[in-house]
Amino acid sequence: MKILVTGGNGYIGSHTLIQLIRSGEFEMVSVDNLSRSAAGTMDRIEAITGVKVKNYAVDICNREDFFSVFEKEGKIDGIIHFAAYKSVPESVDEPVKYYRNNLNSLLNVIEACEKFSVPNLIFSSSCSIYGDVEQLPVTEETPAGEAACPYAHTKQIGEQMIRAYALKHPALQSILLRYFNPVGADMSGLNGELSPDKPNNLMPIIMETGIGKRPEMTVYGTDYDTRDGSCIRDYIHVTDIADAHVKALQFLIRKENKTNCEVFNLGSGHGVSVLEMLHAFEKITGKKLNYKLGPRRQGDIPAIYSNSTKAKQLLGWECKYGVEEMILSAWKWEEHLAKKG
């Protein structure tokens, strides 16, 4: 079966391609114009798996160019849609950019499913759709709250777009995967988070500070109503996230879904604070981090973590890796980058 992965050169997309290859069940093609990812990703995937994945350097927002991929590739059995802008602070600063890119690209994906009779769609959603929740952990039944930033809002709208389409087009089977905070790298240390942009997620910032790429880092907010005053997030190893996409695809192919638009949370089930993650890094690697305490960052919420029982029961999925593997794999990847110069 042939699966098209949008954003296949990106962080989660590339790890999902690796897991799809490891499953031995699929042929893959990637569509990624490298606007938010680095060249060389497909070479790293080949080094890890022995398989070369074809990538089309096409902007998914360009309908004609995107559709030409389907015309060249023939029958596509499923799409996993990752390609989107994802920076919380950037979305606050440039909301129009986020609405235009994230929603137009999804619209073209949905239209492609219809035009080229693609039966299965996995959508990369986010726990950010829940907003600032009062009761934790969140389940799939937790209502969407007010979006804390335009990025989160694009994920809410994206889910609504797929639901509305699925309601009138039963041929398309879809799954919305709401995942929490992906971190870490492939356990080989040969593929991890790498973007041309300056990272604004915690783990790569920790790694860059630890390796000396940046002189210091800032903890944004130490006065939240949490156990140590810093934000609490549900961190999950990127390979676990990738594995969930493979299992979600298999779930649809086996026709085990009860509706044609299913929702699953993907999280570890417990939260780790920013300060706890910093201290864990120092303990595990023996490296001291130069960090300062700063004010809150616009768009952040105090705490969120998941109940992922549904994914365990229906997809047969659960986290295999903990905080130690998250940090060790990310550090191995950072050292690999340092050796390459």
Image (spheres, rainbow, N blue to C red):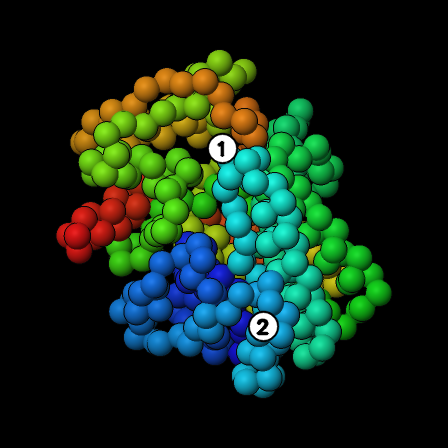
Q: CA distance from mark 1 to mark 2?
A: 35 Å
The percent position of residue 312, horizontal first and vertical second, equals 57, 51
Amino acid type, mark 2: Phe
Q: Residue at x 72, y 58 (%)?
A: 162
Nearest the eye: 338 or 48: 338
Give left or right: position of 157 versus 96.
Answer: right
Judge whether residue 309 can be spotted in this image. no
Question: Within 10 angstroms of label 2, few (less than 14), some, or many (20 or more) residues?
Answer: many
Give left or right: position of 117 versus 13.
Answer: right
Question: Within 10 angstroms of label 1, few (less than 14), some, or many (20 or more) residues?
Answer: many
**Residue for badge 2:** 66
**Quadrant of the frame with the N terminus:** bottom right
**Residue for badge 1:** 233
Of callouts 1 and 2, the N-terminal one: 2
The percent position of residue 8, horizontal first and vertical second, equals 46, 64
Q: Residue at x 44, y 54 (%)?
A: 36
- Camera-near label (1 vs 2) is 2
Give left or right: position of 15 versus 116.
Answer: left
Q: Which mark is residue 182?
A: none
Nearest the eye: 216 or 144: 216
Q: Is residue 190 above or below residue 321?
A: below
In this view, the residue farthest toward the right is 168
Nearest the eye: 193 or 216: 216
The percent position of residue 245, horizontal first and vertical second, equals 53, 60
Q: Residue at x 57, y 61 (%)?
A: 81
Q: Residue at x 66, y 41 (%)?
A: 153
Circle 2: element type = helix
Q: Is residue 67 above or below residue 249?
A: below
The percent position of residue 204, horizontal first and vertical second, equals 34, 41
Amino acid type, mark 1: Arg
